[in-house]
Amino acid sequence: MLSQILLTCRGYFRSVRQYQTTHDVAAAKAFWRSGAAGEHVGLIGTGWIAQRLAAHLHAFGFRVLAADPYLTAEKARRLGVEAVSLDDLFRWSYIVSNHVPDLPSTKGLLGSALFQSMRDGATFINSGRGAQVIESELVAVMRQRPDLTALLDVTFPEPPLPDSPLWTLPNVVMSPHVGGTIGDEVTRLADCAIEEFVAWDAGNPLRYQVTSAVLETMG
């Protein structure tokens, strides 16, 4: 996600599309590109992954906005994020990244009005769940707004239906749900679980304890 955000701020995805059409270096980049310093990134949800992402974003000078009904003022201060409404998050952010858990209350959460309100050249990243997006409405906006980019690691259904326009829209990039633990990361994950067990067995505090309070903040 961090790499996709940084690439967006350099105009990577949009310029690649224009380069394929124009075959001209200058013409491919003939639009305003913000860079990272001071740019707005909007996080939908403030669970563990979003919190870690926010910390990395601060190191690059981003201004981080967050929309989460469970985000308290104290937690926002601790995370260094600005709590805003979902509407304002889409209007103000150059990159919107979805981290909402898959719950009945979040299905169909993201639709046409939100996508249509995005800034010129903005990017929507979905690594949450596909059912949170109304696909037909996202498709309609992406057709109307070639300046926008959608980076989708999840869809609903998964994969999309064979005739889904998501397969062919030039400003939609889909990956086959590559988020998660793979390769040597599995060993690291196991080591973490073992370390937590050893700490629990010794009566020491846990770093990643899941409590009812944590679950509530995840929405």
Image (cartoon, rainbow, N blue to C red):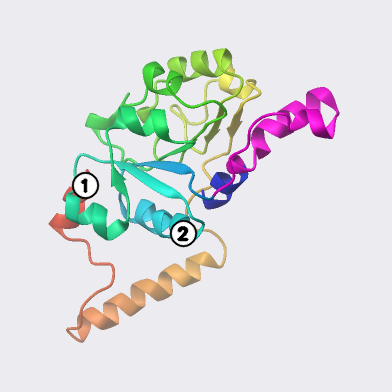
Viewer can see residue 164: no
Q: Residues within 10 Å of mark 2 (few under 14, many from 20)?
A: few
Coordinates of residue 58 in the picture (x, y in percent): 44, 57
Quarter of the image for residue 90 reads top left
Residue 20, magenta (yes or no): yes
Given residues 68 and 184, the one toward you in this image is 68
Secondary structure type for disc 2: helix
Given residues 112 and 190, the one toward you in this image is 112
Quarter of the image for residue 163 reads top right
Secondary structure type for disc 1: loop
Highlighted range, magenta: 8-36
> Can you identify the residue that label 2 sits on?
56
Quarter of the image for residue 170 reads top right
Q: Mark 2 or mark 1: which comes first in sequence?
A: 2
Quadrant in which the C terminus appears: top left
Residue 31, magenta (yes or no): yes
Viewer can see residue 10: yes
Residue type marked 1: Leu
Please tell me whether residue 186 is drawn above or below residue 171 in the rendered image.
Answer: below
Coordinates of residue 216 in the picture (x, y in percent): 16, 49
Residue type marked 2: His
Extreme-bottom residue of the structure = 202
Coordinates of residue 30 in the picture (x, y in percent): 73, 29
Q: What residue is at 42 percent from the left and 71 percent from the top?
A: 190
Coordinates of residue 147 in the picture (x, y in percent): 60, 23
> Can you identify the residue that label 1 sits on?
71
Image side of residue 112 versus residue 211, left or right: right
Image side of residue 29 versus residue 168, left or right: right
Please tell me whether residue 209 is drawn above or below residue 172 in the rendered image.
Answer: below
Please tell me whether residue 116 is drawn above or below residue 23 in the rendered image.
Answer: above
Given residues 93 and 166, the one toward you in this image is 93
